[in-house]
């Protein structure tokens, strides 16, 4: 089976519950999800990503978060799960480690999670996971054509969909922009570091969006990640040809998308 066949189309009808984990550069979050509605059936459990983000240190945090969910009685033995991970993922392995310790490169993330959590797991890029959630049940629901999601947080994650099907592992946050990686200038973390007001940041970010539009011609652009909550503060400073909207699910999109991928993998196995 093609490894991306595990990713459900936006219109896929899934049922049941699954574990969703969102592993980020600054935080690790998880919950049990009703995959049909996207509702979290447990509280969202969150812990900080270790300062030295080695495999051993990060897996210890993931295990602790999942054990706290198991203690609720709603995460049952054998329940499948999905995890969004801040890396290009191929065949369950991490191929990059921009925000993590470089010892992650080449690591069999999916196998490691399955062994430590003792349950079936699927791993995909974290922005891809958020995109799966938004396309199925959020701001991209029912949208055909080309949809681009940008997750603005520690970096700039990106997910691209064509008629509801994911094009995996897009790394648009790393395109060259003003002689640097785009995310090093315009992520949420970069905006804080550079002490940029919304108007100045919006002007530069509009330039970046124009580059993306030139190459991809999206029919819809969705802004997610931490900055989605502040969309009203900078919306008026952004200029695009395509409609531009804020993500509907906020910081739960990655958890919901990962859970849907985990549930779909069980259905198709």
Image (tube, helix red, strand yellow):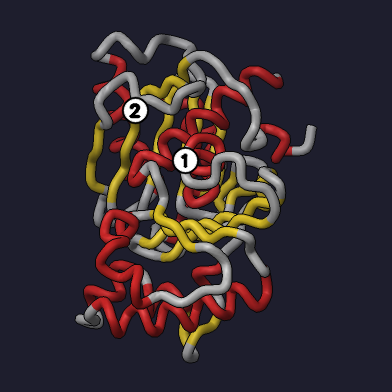
Placement of 21 over or under 242, stated as above or below: above
x, y percent for residue 195? 20, 81
Image quarter of the C terminus:
top right
Q: Residue at x 48, y 48 (%)?
A: 126
Of 71 and 192, nearer the camera is 192
Residue closest to the eye, 51 or 26? 26
Q: Is residue 242 left or right of residue 64?
A: right
* Badge 2 element: strand
Mark 1 secondary-structure assignment: loop
- Tell me, yes or no, whether the two marked residues, 1 and 2, touch with CB atoms within 8 Å: no
To which quarter of the image does residue 252 belong? top left
Does residue 65 appear in the picture of this structure? yes
Vertically, is 19 above or below 226? above
Q: Residues within 10 Å of mark 2 (few under 14, many from 20)?
A: many
Q: Which of marks 1 and 2 is nearer the N terminus?
A: 2
Position of 251 relative to 182 (above/below)? above
Foreground disc of the pair 1, 2: 1
Residue at mark 1 to residue at mark 2: CA–CA distance: 18 Å
Q: Where is residue 53 in the image (x, y as percent from the top left)?
A: 33, 53
Across and down, in percent, residue 89 comes to 59, 49
| Residue at numbered disc 1 | 138
Residue 42 found in image quarter = top left
Q: Mark 2 points at which residue?
A: 31
Q: Is residue 205 left or right of residue 163?
A: left
């Amino acid at each position: 089976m093609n490894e991306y066949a595990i990713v459900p189309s936006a219109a896929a009808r899934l049922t049941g519950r699954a574990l969703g984990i969102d592993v980020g550069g600054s935080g690790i979050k998880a919950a049990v999800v009703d995959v049909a509605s996207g509702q979290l059936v447990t509280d969202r459990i969150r812990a900080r990503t270790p300062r030295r983000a080695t495999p051993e240190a990060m897996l210890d945090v993931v295990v602790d978060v999942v054990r706290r969910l198991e203690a609720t009685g709603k995460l049952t033995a054998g329940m499948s799960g999905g995890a969004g991970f801040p890396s290009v993922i191929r065949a369950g392995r991490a191929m990059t480690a921009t925000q993590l310790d470089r010892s992650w490169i080449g690591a069999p993330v999916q196998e490691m999670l399955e062994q430590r959590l003792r349950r079936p797991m699927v791993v995909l890029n974290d922005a891809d996971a958020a995109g799966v959630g938004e396309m199925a049940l959020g701001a991209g629901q029912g949208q055909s054509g080309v949809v681009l999601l940008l997750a603005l947080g520690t970096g700039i994650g990106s997910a691209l969909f064509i008629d509801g099907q994911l094009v995996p592992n897009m790394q648009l946050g790393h395109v060259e922009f003003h002689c640097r990686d785009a995310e090093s200038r315009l992520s949420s973390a970069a905006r804080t570091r550079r002490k940029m007001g919304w108007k100045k940041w919006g002007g530069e970010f509009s330039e970046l969006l124009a580059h993306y539009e030139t190459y991809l011609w999206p029919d819809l652009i969705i802004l997610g990640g931490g900055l989605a909550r502040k969309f009203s503060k900078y919306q008026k400073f952004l200029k695009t040809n395509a409609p531009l909207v804020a993500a509907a699910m906020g910081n739960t999109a990655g958890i919901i998308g990962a859970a849907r991928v985990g549930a779909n993998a069980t259905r198709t196995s």
